[in-house]
Image (cartoon, rainbow, N blue to C red):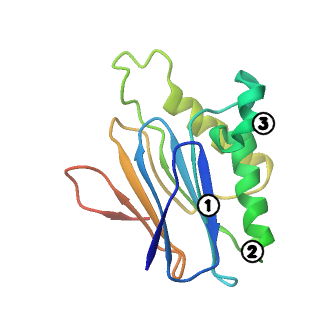
Amino acid sequence: MAELVVGVADLKVSDNPHDILVTYALGSCIGVAVFDPVSKVGGLIHFMLPDSTLDPEKAREKPAMFADTGIPMLFKSCYELGAEKKRILVKVAGGASILEDSNYFRIGQKNIMALRKIFWKNNVLIAAENTGKNCNRTVRLHVGTGEVCVRIPGEEMIKL
């Protein structure tokens, strides 16, 4: 088994059943794991911000930084490996309120709302999620099985 690390503002896709895609320290950021059980294609993105209009130059350099540019890129990358939209299962984690006790900026909530809006507009359903609260998360996608595991410090591992 090979662990492929998905960094902040990054995404990876794979059709290798031995790969595990993993992203660490999801706070207000969101991890979206997608999996096609027929083609056995999986992908994972770790996006930071909801809207690329905040910084169009940065969006060109790192489209995975933003929900509105990164999520479509994730799906297209999976399609290139043989995934089909109608079969893709989507699981989501993150969107916490970590650094802001007053929740003034509400980045986590804005990320969740942007994600839901994109999926709603594109008729994509979320199969499972672990979002909100005030905790960091690590997400692993097992490409061979589509299993998504979420680890929150101090808690039992959660299977989505």
Residue name at image x 23 percent, y 60 percent: 156
Image depth: mark 2 or mark 3 in front: 3
Label located before the other in sequence (2 or 1): 1
Q: CA distance from mark 3 to mark 1?
A: 17 Å
96 displayed left or right of 116: left
Query: Do callouts 3 and 1 mark residues in contact (Cβ within 8 Å)?
Result: no
Say above or below: 158 vs 16.
above
The three-letter code of the residue at mark 3 reads Arg
Please give the label number shown on residue 12. Answer: 1
Q: Residues within 10 Å of mark 2 (few under 14, many from 20)?
A: many
Query: Do callouts 2 and 3 mark residues in contact (Cβ within 8 Å)?
Result: no
Q: Residues within 10 Å of mark 1 (few under 14, many from 20)?
A: many
In the rendered image, the residue lying farthest to the left is 154
The three-letter code of the residue at mark 1 reads Lys
Q: CA distance from mark 2 to mark 3?
A: 25 Å
Residue with the mark numbered 2: 83
Residue name at image x 48 percent, y 39 percent: 95
The three-letter code of the residue at mark 2 reads Ala
Residue with the mark numbered 3: 60
